[in-house]
Image (cartoon, grey):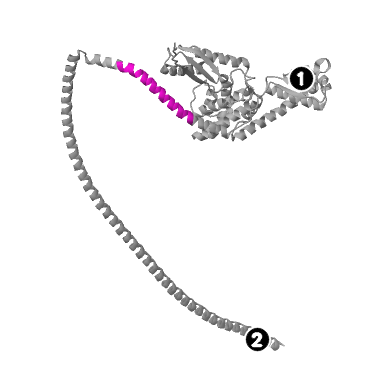
Amino acid sequence: MEQIILVSILTLILGILGGIGLSFLISYIKGTSIQKKADKFLEEAKKEAEKQKRDRLLEFKEESYKLKQEIEKEVKEKKEELKSNENRLLQRENSLDKRDEILQKRELSLEEKEQNLLAKQKELQAKDEKMDELLKEEMEKLESISKFSQEKAKELIMKRCEEEMTREIASYVKEKEQEAKLQANEAARNIIVESMQRYSDDVATEQTVSTITLPNDDMKGRLIGREGRNIRTIEAVTGVDLIIDDTPETIVVSSFDPLRREIAKVTIETLIKDGRIHPSRIEEVYDKVCKDINNKITEIGTEACYELGITKVDPELVNLIGKLAYRTSYGQNALKHSKEVGELCGLMAAELGQNVALAKRAGLLHDIGKSIDYEVEGSHVEIGLDIAKKYHEDETVLNAIASHHGDKEQTSIISVLVSVADTLSAARPGARNDSLENYIKRLEQLEAIGNSFEGVEKTYAMQAGREVRVMVRPEEVDDVLSYKIAKDMKEKIEAEMQYPGTIKIIVIRESRAQEEAK
């Protein structure tokens, strides 16, 4: 039994020793194979590195060669450029040398000419001195012969020349002024006529009353109301006079303020359509109509600016422009007049090469003061100037407003155009109406101014005051003086009278030779 255990232990020990030896043997075999593989890998890596080294060297040599060629090329170009610059500098140097030679020659010639001029100047001075001496001697001889001193002779000659030339100068001035007027009038007439041909508007005269048609005569009683309370309320609220007479199915609204008249007319027409007519309803409808009319005024002002092509206008100023539609001057609608003036200004400004937009703006705003002249004290010119300043209008527009009636000096061509266009619009036939009293006063004043001049026999105002004919006494007034009378009369009329349009002054001098055969 013990022998079997020993044999087993020996066998186990031999097995363990054999396993250890076998493992050592296997490790040795594996180590030798790995070493061989590593050596082989290192060898291949060395070969690859040498190959890459050769490739890099070749690439470096190629790049060095290319760089060398490029540098040589650039150096060559720079050399050629330097050579061309050097050639140009040489050429310039040669040209400068030539110029220097030419300038030197000119300088020499100028010096010679200067010397010649100095010599001639000395000769002339000597001759002048000699001439002065001769003239002095001759003058002394003339004074001794004529027994007149030089000063007395000069004074006598000047006096005669003044007397003889006075009439000639007057005639010459008259002729030249007439010639200038003809040319200026022709040019101005062409511009104005062309502008008027290119712009035309209907002639419409505004009245101070509006007529309202009623559906039946019973409506008159309803408008009057019990004990007249409705008509009193209408007149008190609207500020107009309501005329209800025997005219069938018609009543009349009367007021000098067209805006009030329009509001009253629309209010009454609305009440008639509604059928409810009593004081509270009248006030309610009146308030609503006022708001509607105010919106309508803004629309009218906007449309006027749009028609003239005017932009950047303050909304409050647009509202004032719209109010001009309800203002009249001698029966002429103020907005239509302002639009017409704006159009004419624009057309004439285009002919004269001026700012068309600014001319139209000045023309439209020239009577803006009339929109509130019923509410504010002062002339429409002063009110309009304050309004334009408030809304920061251009200085040209301010001057056009201030000077369109001659109250201030006109500082620009556009101001003159506004004045001309204003006169054209107001003076054209049918544009305005005037009272008989004012018409007769203007004619009498024209005749009185004409008769105030010395030598005038009779003065006649003709063509509704557009022309004045002055008859002078031929024995007291000659042709030159008649021309002076016409000019002085023109200045006096411009200074003392206010009138639309222009007035032509004709001075007539007639000489008659009469004999009787017996």
In the figure, 16 relative to 273: above or below?
below
In the rendered image, residue 248, in percent from the top left (x then y), is placed at 80, 21
Element assignment for label 1: helix
As drawn, the label of residue 478 is none
In the rendered image, residue 490, in percent from the top left (x then y), is placed at 48, 18
Secondary structure character of the magenta stretch overall: helix
In the figure, 71 relative to 122: above or below?
below
Element assignment for label 2: helix
In the rendered image, residue 66, in percent from the top left (x then y), is placed at 39, 68
Quarter of the view holding residue 135: top left
Task: Work out whether residue 225 or residue 387 is closer to the camera in this orientation and state it.
Answer: 225
Say whether residue 251 is magenta: no
Of the 4 image quadrants, the one containing the N terminus is: bottom right
Q: Is residue 253 left or right of residue 43?
A: right
The amino acid type, in three-letter code, at marker 2 is Leu
Q: Name the residue under label 2.
A: 10
Say whether residue 175 is magenta: yes
Q: Which residue is drawn at 64% across and 22% down?
A: 331
The amino acid type, in three-letter code, at marker 1 is Ile
Quarter of the view holding residue 233: top right
Of the 4 image quadrants, the one containing the C terminus is: top left
In the figure, 114 relative to 133: above or below?
below
Q: Mark 1 points at which residue?
A: 234
- Highlighted range, magenta: 160-186
Task: Work out whether residue 114 or residue 183 is closer to the camera in this orientation and state it.
Answer: 183
- 10 Å neighbourhood of mark 1: few (<14), some, or many (≥20)? many
Residue at the outermost front position: 518
